[in-house]
Image (cartoon, coloured by chain):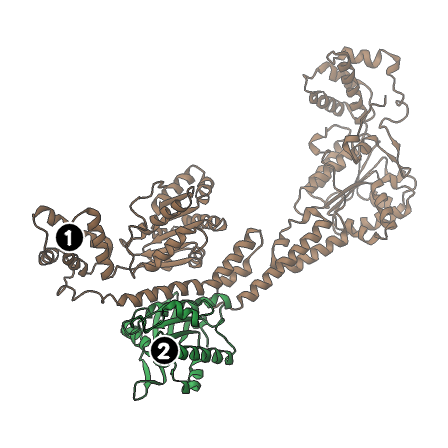
Amino acid sequence: MSLVNFTTREITCKIVYYGPGRSGKTTNLHYIYGRVPNDRRGRMVSLATENERTLFFDFLPLDLGNISGFTTRFHLYTVPGQVYYDATRKLVLQGADGVVFVADSQARQLDENIESLQGLQANLVAMRSDMRSMPLVFQYNKQDLPPELILRPDDLDDALNFWGIPSYASDALQGKGVFETLRAISERVLRRLSQEGPR
Amino acid sequence: MTEQLNPRLTFETLVVGAANRLAVTAARTVGESPGTAYNPLFIYGESGLGKTHLLTAIGHLARHLVTDADVEYVTLDEFVEQYHAAVAAGQSEALRGRFGRVDVLLLDDVQFLTNRRELQAELLRILEQLQGANRQIVLTSDRPPAEIQELDERLLSRFDGGLVVDLDAPDYETRIAILKRRAGERGVPVDPAVLEVVAGIRVHNVRELLGLLNRIVAYQAVSDVPITPEAAHQLLAGDAPLPRPSAAGADVAPAPPGDEFADFLSGVTMAVHEQVGVWRSRITECIKRWGGEGYRTARLEHLLKQEVPTGVERVIREYERDVDRLRGFQRAMARVDPHRVSDPIFYDPERLTEADELVQSALREGRPPPGPSPAWLFEALVTGESNRMALNAANTVIASPGVTYNPLVLTGPPGVGKTHVLHAIGNELQGDPGARVACLSAQEFVEELLDAIDGDRVEAWRKRYRGATALLLDDVHLLAGKERSQEELFNLYNTLLAEDRQLVFTLVDQPSAIDGLDRRLVTRLEGGLVAGLDEPDPDVRRGVLFRRLKAKDRAVDPELVEYLTARPADSVRSVINLVQRVLRAAQAEGVEPTAPFAKALLEGAAHTVRASAGVRTSGAMASAVSSMRSREKVVWEWPDPEERVIEELA
């Protein structure tokens, strides 16, 4: 998708929250939704199953207004985490400008995190992209849980983050680390412009 | 210019909130690395929001990090005052030089540039100078650049090429932080609940906010007990025309978490600022780089005017490729004609074809033809009856070359000054813009032709002379009997005359009197003006003697001048020989040269009779091509001046 359109003077970024089921991707979007002034956010679209799992995806449009003469919009998406929704994940990933990988910090969820990360890499490769070229940040969610249940950010970095990508500890329910993550991915997405040049 | 920055206005004393976070971040970056990040940095916001504070803080930070950083803070009013003073004193260059040397120029309140065209032009020059030297400029204004009325487009685009950031009124949290800090600085304990009441009142700027705090502090100072929130409420609502909060906190800004979005927004804004400006920065960088090297950058400047960056990289690539080609042409020209390497064509990528043609034509023409000798100037000629006509004709030729007397043919025996007049004309013509005067002796002409024939370069040799704006040929009689040379001269003559190029020739006699000169050439030479130079008359002799004697840095003895003037001399050269002989003899005997001394020397002894007197007076000698060249010309053209020994052949 066109990130920066100089003709219409618009910047549109598609950011996808990716991660295993129940890692807190939709919670991130809910928190953001709650903190963005009414006039800056569109309707949040969330298609959930009966037991509140994301069936298709969440979509939250943010209109950041006029920045440097450019109408700037961020479109935040989440993918369904459950393994069997891989086709939907591929669909949502199409045209993504940046990805937030939301990992579940619980020690017992490590395998799910790894599996999801592998899935992300496979899907990116299928799109002729990969984790090194796609702007990406890690978010280690649920860091508020008792220490004995979770892995520390350093451990998670060791297990998942082989590329030294920025990572953020978070407690999405309370909002800790949510905006830091969003800001980081946004800046990375925008900075990629300077490497690619204006489109 | 304000040398001292207010020591209180630093980044440490600045309270940062969502309203000024972007500006503060940008300002800090600029302070940490002046001239590299955002240049110029333009900060705007309403009065009392901390523009001057930020400006001063940048200055402090730059001075702190680089000990000898030359930081200048100046308000526009001061700048105007100094500019007017400098203009009145005729020293606007000096002012520009002074501002242009600072490492960081902090210019406050530039909104007053409105409708000041001259001042804007001056500021633009300073801005260009500073940017060109990677020096930082920071400006503040109460409105964005586009809203400064009648602001020069070039200034506007310069400002846009840097970073333009705004300062907004502080939000609730920032207001609380400011109040707490200021109360703390004053050492006045104020109940936090009171500060919340103060902060709850919406103000337009920090000064108004501090005014409210002042009233609280003043109230507390006159009462023994600290002010309560309710009392503060009453106090501030009493006579202040400020909106009163309906209840504590009810009319306040959103709760603290709202700042998260503001922070996020400020981060995104920074990133967008940096990124969308990338192409403009890239072009500006290129303009600075190539413009700095003297290349015309109109093509790149045109890019900056477009809203949409269409094909920026492609245009830059093409521009740089063209500059490369220009450099290639310039190098080629340096090999052919070094005098023409600074031609403006070689600095204009829009004139690539012309540059190419210029080099091609230079290559065709080869090196430029020999020019007039700077030793023979018009001012050094002495006028008298014997040369008056020739010099009048020379003046006419100089005034309107190729028009009145074409060709001008100067005739006269050796030593009367024909060569001098010829080169003097050449030097005067050379001064015209674009002039390419060929001035040489017929003997050189022959030698060059022989070389060209030998090297199979005759066509190139011809082109070289055909490109001349004037042809001045000395001693044409030396061409006598040289058929090929005469033919070449004949053809060249016709070509140049057809284009109204001036032709000047010298001969020892009337053309028709020279044996071995082609009739075609003779008739053409005589078709112009044939002006004779005779043996020097007394006026010329007197003038020459006077100059020679004066040139030796002594008082001129009029009696000596008259005596020498009266001596027989068939040429200027013999007059010069005469005076040199007297001077040398006087020097050898350690006496002043006087008339009696000269008389004794020249008439007293038989040995003073010159061996050469009955032969030739100009000291002619045999040349390599069996022609006759004057001694003076040979000496002048000797390749190594160090090896020239001028000897009196007495």
Question: Which one is in front, B416 or A114?
Answer: A114
Residue B578 location, x and y as percent? 80, 20
Q: Neighbour class for label 2 at 10 Å: few (<14), some, many (≥20)?
A: few
- Among the chains pictured, the one given brown colouring is B
Relative horizontal placement of residue B208, taking residue A146 as reference (left or right) = left
Chain ID of residue with mark 1: B
Residues at discs 1 and 2 both on one chain: no
Q: Pick the residue in front: B162 or B498.
A: B162
Q: Which mark is residue A72?
A: none
Residue B322 visible in the displayed image: yes
Q: Looking at the image, is A72 positioned above or below residue B443? A: below
Residue B190 image label: 1
Q: Quadrant of residue B583?
A: top right
Q: Which residue is mark 2?
A: A108
Q: Name the one closer to the observer, B122 or B573.
A: B122
Q: Which secondary structure lies at badge 2? A: helix
